Image (cartoon, coloured by chain):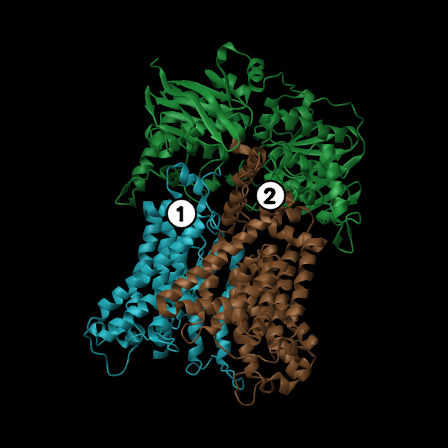
Chain colours: A green, B cyan, C brown
Amino acid sequence: MGEYVVEMLNITKIFPGIKANDDITLQLKKGEVHALLGENGAGKSTLMSVLFGLYQPESGTIKINGETVKINNPNDANSLNIGMVHQHFKLVEVFSVLDNIILGVEPNTAGVLKRKEAREKIVALSKRYGLSVDPDALVEDISVGMQQRVEILKMLYKNNEILIFDEPTAVLTPQEIKELMDIMRGLTAEGKSILFITHKLNEIIEVADRCTVLRKGKYMGTVTVADTTKEELSRMMVGRDVHFTVEKKDIPLGKVVLQAENVTVASKRHKNNAVKNISFSVRAGEILCLAGIEGNGQSELVYALTGIEKVSSGKLTLNGTDITKASIRRRSRLGMSHIPEDRHKYGLILEYSLANNLVLQRYWEPEFQKSGFINEAKVLSYANKLIAQYDVRSGQGAHTIVRSMSGGNQQKAIIAREIDKHPELLVAIQPTRGLDIGAIEYIHAQLVAQRDSGKAVLLVSLELDEVMNVSDRILVMYEGEIVGEFNPRETTVEQIGLYMAGAKRDTPASGNKTETDSKKQRLE
Amino acid sequence: MIIFADIMNATIIFAIPLLVVALGGMFSERSGTINIALEGIMIVGALFSCLYLNSVSKSGWGADHPLLAMLFAILIAGFSGIIFSLFLALASVSLKADQTIGGTALNMFAPAFAIVLTWAIQGQGQTTIEIPTWVRITQQSLGLTPSATPNFMETFIFKNLFLTTPVVLLFLAITVFVIYKTRFGLRLRACGEHPQAADSVGINVYRLRYTGVGISGFLGGIGGLAFTIAAGSGFQSTVAGYGFFALAVMIFGNWKPVRIFGAALFFALFKVIGSYTGSISFLPRFEGVKSADYIYQMLPYIVTMIVLIFTSKKSRAPKAEGIPYDKGTR
Amino acid sequence: MMTKFKKIVQSPGFSSFLASVASIGIGLIFGYLILAVINPSMSLYGLGKILFAGASDAERISKVLYQAAPLLMTGLAVGFAFKTGLFNIGATGQYTMGAFFALYAGIILKMPWWAALLAAMVGGAIWGAIPGICKALFNVNEVITAIMFNWIGLFAVNLSLLNIPKILDKVSANRTVNLAVANKSAIIPKAGLDTLFGSSYMNISILITAGIAIVIYIVLNKTTFGYELKACGLNRNASIYAGINAKRNIILSMVISGGLAGIGGGIYYLSGTAQFLVVKSLLAMGFNGIPVALLATSNPVGTIFSSLFVSYIQVGGEAMQPQFSPEIINIIISVIIYLSAFSMLLKGLINRLLTRQNSKREKEMELKASSVIDDSKSIQPEAANANHSESEDVNK
């Protein structure tokens, strides 16, 4: 069939101990938008990395426009006009948009750069495809949506015809997602063919022509989107019926546990404040969720709450005690627990044993040490208790060096440690990031259990599904301010999206808005 | 008045080795490798080039072709530096070892090797490799006649002039051009800031990092020769910590070539100022303190520390430096 | 019995040990090659001296032990700093300061030896605090700070010595006066060991320092203080999250490290057989602490053995004169350091060779561990702990 522009036939890719792709076949028609659907660990990124030349398959064939090819590196992929926009942008922050686009394909005479030539081409391309950018802006200064456009321009500049997008909407607001969908339709209208990796069913329904589903490295099937439903897709994806909602008891609201009054926190990245004069409270028996696109002040607010950063002004009270200037340890003693955003950076000491990590917040208590000497037997028995109770799996039990544990079990260890303190307030940031469905369900159950037992939970999440299903009350943050408060049962994802994007707000805006305040993401 | 020309000339002579080594360090760090081994590289470059100068001096060829001999010496210094720096590159880039430890090993190896080699060639006890006098460019050697009483310009240029000075200044200009205006410079910088991005567009990060380290070897070796010439008493298997000074200069110059030049001049001035206490009235002489020149010897180090304390908070190092690049990490 | 033996052989600790032994072996071979190039006929003689001279007579054995003591201290200093995530290249400056404080206390203030040693510790501790403070408060690279202060320390001590006439020897005015003349009580006691070993060099310094090594081992591994220090070194962010005062701990560990190096200076110069010379170059004893620490992978007890080893080959090196320059020993030592820079690799290779019979499951665990990135950690001079957040994307 001459209509296939890409054929990946019987691809198998093995990593030590893992068969990431097991005899997978994928066929892309010219001018179509083809979605690649699967959970974490399904093998989607691996398959696309094979197509892009980053990995070599153990077996299988790749055909481009009917011809069998070997793709050994991104240069080969590029000469076959294949391009890829990665989930973590591959942009050099301190370079300009122009320099990022030409990197690797620089127009030059004997090595000396010819930027003017490139500039003209970029301006022409951006006009043609409706991708407006400023070629001289530094990447670190532009918004995430614009950065993605730079990545797209990179592909167009190299005359790529086959465009691969890896989870492109993870970092965008609902409005930006709509814009991206329009851009994709524009690209296919011009004859480009698009492959896009996702685990979001709405987007597939919205923009894809066909969809291939992978599960645990195996090929599940290809469907035409117009002929299928969300339920069928999700069943193919996980192999069982997925519960989209979380079971919660009806609990009476208790007293205020955390009170934040007029809290302002400075930003490390720019001159304005990251958190501007915010006030809110969390009560016993509720899960309050702070929603918003990453980069709107949630991280800074949480760091201020937990003591990792200072507040510039304002007051924080925990069960009546003023903790505004309290040390981290004091807050912990007063009943605050923190499940951090980045488990490797803050949550664990990877070279320590599991036991030593499990007592990270309590090693100084009289139970575990005497006159400065650690009671190793006590530490071990405590660790074993937690391991059994929370089903934390590892190679050598309490003596395992944490670095060798899987992400899900590392997160379970952190959760075990933080919840076992029976905290009055549990602060959880992105607790389920990067984990599979089983682990996600487990963690949600733990959060709900805390709430059901009359404690307070503050959840910060970027996953709208999680936000809607788990929380009792939602506060949306935009540019450092709270712009709206919602009851998840009485609102929709679209409504929240509007507030997240700043298109709507319930509270009057404060002063200074700058370019740099806009939604940003840490570039990887 | 002449005294100031004197001081400026001396400052430049000491700034040149700082400048060239700091530029070398910049190339290495901008490509992503911290080069702690600059001290060792300087020693190796100085060792081989001085041995060369010594031997062509003995044969007489050197005195007949001073400029040509110096040019060869510079090249030898550079190339021996490259070879030595490859050991650092091997450990840091290919084997992904700890860059500080690898550098420290090389820094220990170089002076020990220099002493052993000098001992083997010149015999026990002869630890200095003499530098011939004809390396100095005088007005006579260029065919000019000096004025009866020395004037400002003559003193400024000719008091101590060696081929290394204009060569290094040329390298400075080339560096500015290469880093900002060429494809190579763009790619090099990408490797030091975001190697994954560079790799994803098909750039060979390993090769570029090797090149960055190699260039630092080349410039560092030349710096060793320039230092030995400036110090004036022949090669004694040491460069007195200049390799680390150069790192401070690089940090103070925020990894930018022209600022590095300014920083080098700044530090060299403090090194030099101690010898002029007699001639300049406002420099304190510390009468009554024995061996007061130790105070002035401490001065450049103290000034370096003060400057670093004030500038380190805002420093903008290449983002991916010091982190070995592993293709597997995505 | 067999399984216990197997367990030991397959443990990571044993592989570390073998990796160190391999580094030493390669270093010695390299040294031999240099000897062979310089003077082929005498090369075996030279190698023989390196390998055996240290144990050849009582005098030499005593010298090995007596020189091992200060090396052990600087090795402990560097190793302690390593464990807490810092590279203390300033050990030589702290050592020099320690020596100065000890000599001043002994000669001018006429204090007894143990008080002078305490003074040495204080001197080293102060000098160690400086790079710690600069790093913690101003984010200045601790390697460069330490090097600058090595030189500042050298010049400051020289300046001070030359301006305190009473401290100097009457005859050779560039060295300190002999302690036997100035203040006998400042000399470290021999406790009969000199007659036992048959050499006037021998004193209790090696015993004192070995005792200190054991104390340091206990502190690092059995106390909450050690737990906190290591946490700061391994992951500064996580230690802040755990409520540990990271800034204070960085300074504290540099203070302790400096204090240890300072004691080393005191130990050496209070022996009664060494006089402090005013020189223009940095004292080697401080730098030699680095290979001592690396060979023992910073384990305080292991450092006892590595310091004995380095001292042993140094005595051998001295004995090679006049045919060969003793600097060859430094060449061997630098090769050993270079090899330890990729000890991880060596260790992994050796471990894999020894554990070929591993079950499939264990092998998968091991490979998974080595494929999880980011081995080189905080021993990088430049600022920010640039640890990217590891997402689970590896297996998508």
Return the residue nearer the eye: B8 or A346. Answer: A346
- Provide the residue designation for mark 2: A345
Q: Quadrant of the N terminus of chain C?
A: top right
Chain designation of label 2: A
Q: Is residue A486 above or below residue C372?
A: above
Residue A522 visible in the current orientation = no
Q: Is residue C108 above or below residue C285?
A: below
Q: Amino acid at mark 2?
A: Lys
Q: Is residue B17 above or below residue B317?
A: below
At 64% from the left edge and 20% from the top edge, which residue is drawn?
A244
The furthest residue to the bottom: C171
Judge from the rendering whether residue C116 lies leftward or rightward of residue A130; answer left or right.
right
Return the residue nearer the eye: C293 or B316. Answer: C293
Mark 1 to mark 2: distance in Å? 26 Å
Q: Secondary structure at mark 1?
A: helix
- Provide the residue designation for mark 1: B189
The furthest residue to the front: C1
Q: Nearer the viewer, mark 1 or mark 2?
A: 2
Q: Residue C198: x, y in percent?
A: 61, 78
Q: Residue A7: x, y in percent?
A: 39, 20
> Badge 1: how crowded within 10 Å, few (<14), some, or many (20+)?
many
Quarter location, residue A190: top left
Q: Amino acid at mark 1?
A: Arg
Q: Secondary structure at mark 2?
A: helix
